[in-house]
Image (cartoon, rainbow, N blue to C red):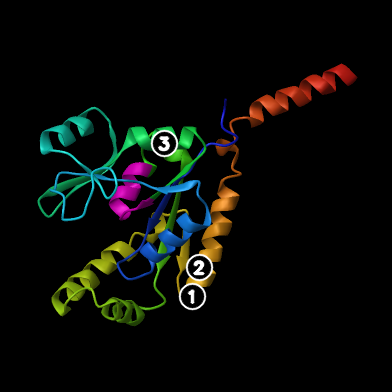
Amino acid sequence: MTAPRRGLLIILSSPSGAGKSTLARRLRDWDSEIEFSVSATTRPPRPGEEDGREYHFVDEARFKMQVAEGGMLEHAHVFGNFYGSPRPPVQAAIDEGRDVLFDIDWQGAQQITNSSLGPHTLSIFLLPPSIRELRQRLEKRGQDGAEVIARRMEKSWDEISHWGAYDFVIVNDDLDQTEAQLKTIISATRLRRSQQPQLTDHVRRLQSEFEELS
């Protein structure tokens, strides 16, 4: 049976500290048809991590083979390890009318947008209200030391400079308001013609009815 709609590849990007992870969790709580993309990686599992939950853990040879065969929607080499988004589970999800949420940077977003699944992609970039506020958020999290925060701040402008490549851009100065805006954007994009494969058959039925009545 054909799904009532085709799923979306929802890309959510931002500099570290702009609220991306919190909003991604809220979106998942809002609608069970939105699922997180589970990335593949060549790094070893950390204590408590399970294969298929946090990541798909693969060796480098298998990872490179998947890339060569077109099995990765996007991939990158980060700090000595490979990371990527396997295509088969994403394809299966959107064919079944479920949305897949990607928490990735601008480079990964560009690769997915330029892939064969690009027409079903919705990309959203979150901007902080100010650089000062971005730094304060990173410091308040208490997860990183001063040196790591400094590196994240250096990288933040590189991320922000690519804001123009996204479909939608939101200044996240109020978490609840931003959440509401994200829900509106997703709900509207689900109604795009490209996301409703049954529309063609419906219009054909209307045409047949019209001809019968003529």
Q: Amino acid at mark 3?
A: Leu
Q: Which residue is mark 3?
A: 117
Name the outermost residue toward the top: 212
Q: Which mark is residue 178?
A: 2
> Callout 2: helix, strand or loop?
helix
> Callout 3: helix, strand or loop?
loop
Q: Amino acid at mark 2?
A: Thr
Q: Which mark is residue 201?
A: none
Q: Is residue 202 above or below residue 143?
A: above
> Callout 1: helix, strand or loop?
loop
Q: Which residue is mark 1?
A: 174
Q: Residue at x 52, y 71 (%)?
A: 176
Q: Amino acid at mark 1?
A: Asp
| Residue 106 inside the magenta-drawn segment | yes
Disc 3 vs disc 1: which is toward the camera? 1
Residues shaded magenta? 102-112
